[in-house]
Image (tube, grey):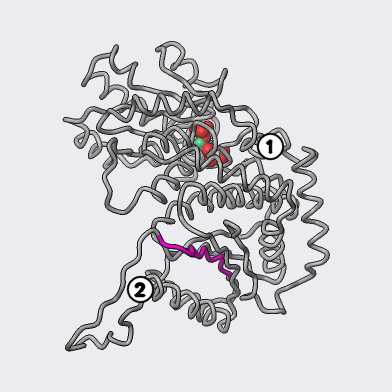
Amino acid sequence: MKPLRVNTTYIDKEYRHDLAVLSSHVSEAHAKIKNKTGAGSDFLGWYDLPIKLEASLLERIVKTAERLRKLDVLLVIGIGGSYLGAKAVIEGLNGYFEKSQCEIIFVGHQLSSSYMVELKTYLKDKNFGINVISKSGTTTEPAIAFRVFKQLLEEQVGKKEAKQRIVATTDGARGALRSLADQEGYETFDIADDIGGRYSVLTAVGLLPMAVANVDIYSFVQGMKEAYKAYNIDGHPEVYEYVKARHSLYQKGKKIEIFVYYEPALYFTAEWWKQLFGESEGKDGKGLFVASLGFTTDLHSMGQYIQDGERHLFETVIAIKEPVHDIKIESDRDNLDGLNYLQGLSVNTVNHQAMLGTLLAHSDGGVPSIVIELEKLDAYHLGYLMYFYELSCGISGYVLGVNPFDQPGVEAYKKNMFALLEKPGFEALTETLKKRLK
Ligand code: PA5
């Protein structure tokens, strides 16, 4: 049984635009990735990382994780690609109500002062440590959070002990975090030059927090490895099918792709996916706008818009074949709720029928769907799915004609923020912006 299948039968003929032409574009784009001949080819380290990952690195990650797991809380400080991969996997796999031995709390992924103050209070009587993650080592949000929580940690346990509880994941040579970590003598993990943030889930960026949270990182790596082999060596068609389907829909005016999941544990997998595709493809005035919804919850809110609103949407539905747990609906003698027609069925069967009914309804309403069928939700399959998406994203960006590995647009807000905060070097822009704000 394949771990992942792509089902395009919920896309009507009218949207299957020039699939033959797209086929050649897709294989050319794939060749550019394999041969490193496309734009941004300096950032292709993720491509064969699953088969190049060193066993000694994994061992060191596991060893460090064992040490950190003894703490009550690990703060993971990072933003964008430096937090979403770990967050997606931990939330996806660690159960809804289970408490892990060491609680993982993310911070530095926004600038909420209330969040920071409440977190400081929460940490008062807790033994905590920090994994600060920033490839550039200069990103403002995590840098501020690190300053705040490093100070708190030093106040709570003293400078010497704090150094033992801080691990920095950053560039091997450059950036403020690298110099700070070297100066303070923290344990560090390097992020390779050729791996950008949103493609870094298989580095220490993703793997260390996952390992502390007790995720089976060996199975995760194995899933990525087998997806690498399936799509780059054995020629399995799923990546091409997905890329062709979404481009065909885009060309036919479907400008918004909604990632739909029926398992709430996938909430952050959707966030990770949005960053991957949004940041990789949204440039040069092009690219699908990527969104996400959790069904059936959002069928009771956004469901109306999808069925009847503007017709610029398509959905990519993640269907998990085997749930982690299932529960049978029992018969009730009085049947006052009228649900006895469901007796003997499982809740997952009801969820599945809801999905099938929705696929047909949305198709009738002019919203086509690509269905990605994943055998189950465990570390192996999530690794497999994430590699499937990374490769699809790289290929898709080249088919669209953009560089899928840069993010020049992210700089615009940063420049304005620095100017408004009167950072030295931004004086001229400070003056211009202040005038505009009056
Ligand atoms: O994908 C990316 O490159 C970005 O989302 C970065 O991960 C994000 O901006 C954080 O950057 P850094 O790790 O340098 O702090």
Q: Amino acid at mark 1?
A: Leu
Mark 2, residues whose alpha carbon is within 10 Å: few (<14), some, or many (≥20)?
some
Which residue sits at x=45%, y=41%?
Answer: 86
Mark 1, residues whose alpha carbon is within 10 Å: few (<14), some, or many (≥20)?
many
- Residue that badge 2 annotates: 346
Q: Is residue 212 left or right of residue 225?
A: left
Q: Amino acid at mark 2?
A: Ser
198 inside magenta stretch: no
Secondary structure beneath disc 2?
loop
Q: Is residue 265 placed above or below 47 in the rendered structure?
A: below
- The answer to whether residue 186 is visible is yes
* Distance from Cα at disc 2 to Cα at disc 1: 44 Å
Q: Is residue 312 left or right of residue 76?
A: right
Q: Nearer the viewer, mark 2 or mark 1?
A: 2
Give whichever of 422, 157 is nearer the camera: 157
Magenta range: 314-323
Which residue sits at x=42%, y=51%?
Answer: 92
- Pinpoint residue 234: horizontal percent, then vertical percent: 73, 50
Which residue sits at x=62%, y=64%?
Answer: 6
- Pinpoint residue 14: horizontal percent, then vertical percent: 72, 79
315 inside magenta stretch: yes
Q: Is mark 2 within 8 Å of ligand 1?
A: no
Secondary structure beneath disc 1?
loop
- Residue that badge 1 annotates: 44
Give whichever of 132, 261 is nearer the camera: 261
